[in-house]
Image (spheres, rainbow, N blue to C red):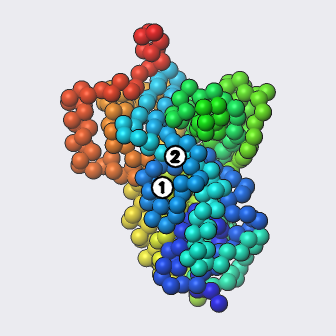
Amino acid sequence: MFDVHVIGAGPGGSFAAIGALAQGKKVLISEEDAQVGSPVKCSGHISVTGLEKMSEHINYKPAVQNSITTAHIRAGKQLFVIKNQGGPKSLVLDRAKLDAICAAAAEKEGAVLSLNSKARMPYEADCIIGADGPASSVAQAFGFPKISRFVSCFQAEFDYQCEDVHAVEVLLSEKNYPGFFGWVIPITNERARIGLGVEMPHISKRAFDGMLSEFKLEYSKCESCLSGVIPIAARAKTAGTFGKKKVCLVGDAAGQVKASTGGGIFFASQCGLLAGKNAATPEKYESQWRGAFGTDLLMHSLLHDAFARSGDGGAALMLSLGKTFMFDALLSECGEMDRASVMLKASTLQKWLGIFTGGKRSGNMETLEEKSSRK
Ligand SMILES: Cc1cc2nc3c(=O)[nH]c(=O)nc-3n(C[C@H](O)[C@H](O)[C@H](O)COP(=O)(O)OP(=O)(O)OC[C@H]3O[C@@H](n4cnc5c(N)ncnc54)[C@H](O)[C@@H]3O)c2cc1C
């Protein structure tokens, strides 16, 4: 009865359904939870450019909670500031609402959404799209190669006095957040999502307890506590034909996540669209998504490894070198949160040369020592 069976109603699944519906396919989406988007396992921080791309299919605006112009990246005493010059660079969203908006858009286009419905072999169509998250049962059922690296996360919401409601804090410390980082994402002046990730096999809950005592929050009321895992490497193969069955994996199920930040919503949505359009030709999907986003994901992976493997002193040194070479000014002017490959463009190199040789320092980055010596 259905041409395409999408497993999972996260952003990857809903956008995959939208892509398939655009090809005139009959689509079933199975979601094992009773409600789309719940329980939430996300910080809801997404680039404006990514959301604008998604807005070709959805109206994300009702889910917006805050706008972000600035990122404070800290390692030891080093503070590296990226401050966007022309308005917000990213938005903080109510993730449950965003997922509901995406699924409603797929339903409006004609998808049948089945809640409380854990999909299993043999599935309801010959074309199967596994958008079923990092522990994908579709990937297991068809014997796809495993994802090799994961980050384990813990996060909660606290009443918290934010110095700047439009600035996210990124905390690098190999001791406290091995292999990843801690974060503070303001929702309002007085409320923030505070959390961290550690590369597995480190344990995020233990690290989170340490983080709370450092923030003097161990006795504060915490709400919306969540734990989850993020894949930080793509599967070696994400699509294939198995007899009559054509299978594509999308989003976290495929490992389509930025290893540097753990952001996966944008990639899940865009790769989802490609999977939906190519549901009957999985090999085409594989080459299309790798062609469109492979370089970006590779660059995020290299950045992640450079920081994760350098230890505390190394991370501080890299931020310091970034300051010396004025990457703070460059990123403030033209940094791209998702499409890291933009940094490889000749025009970006030209911009950097202009900034570096002209000495156009924005004053965005300074060490804490420098800051306190100014005071
Ligand atoms: C703590 C944390 C913070 C994060 N913060 C951010 C952030 O700020 N920005 C960002 O871009 N990304 C963030 N991410 C990553 C982001 O959440 C994922 O990359 C994104 O959700 C991937 O979307 P998806 O559709 O592939 O998978 P998911 O959103 O995981 O959706 C998978 C769906 O499949 C369903 N499912 C699973 N198995 C079955 C089955 N057998 N049958 C039916 N349904 C099934 C699940 O219930 C789920 O609804 C974060 C992740 C974590 C863990």
Q: Dot 2: few (<14), some (14–19), or many (≥20) neighbours within 10 Å? A: many
Q: How far apart are the two marked residues, 1 and 2, measured between alpha carbons?
A: 9 Å
* Residue 237 visible in rendering: no
Q: Kindly identify which numbered label has been placed on residue 51.
A: 1
In the displayed structure, would residue 148 be above or below residue 246? Answer: above
**Residue 365's image quarter?**
top left
- Asked whether 76 or 51 is in front, the reply is 51
Which residue has dot 2 on it? 91
Q: Dot 1: few (<14), some (14–19), or many (≥20) neighbours within 10 Å? A: some
Q: Could you tell whether 337 is left or right of 187 in the image?
A: left
- Screen quadrant of the N terminus: bottom right
- Residue drawn 39% across the image and 56% down it: 295
Q: Which comes sooner in the sequence, label 1 or label 2?
A: 1
Looking at the picture, how far across and down is residue 233, in whole percent? 53, 55
Question: Mark 2 is on which residue type?
Answer: Leu
* Residue 122 visible in rendering: yes
Secondary element under disc 1, as helix, strand or loop, is helix
- Residue drawn 61% across the image and 68% down it: 104
Q: Are marks 1 and 2 in contact (CB under 8 Å)?
A: yes
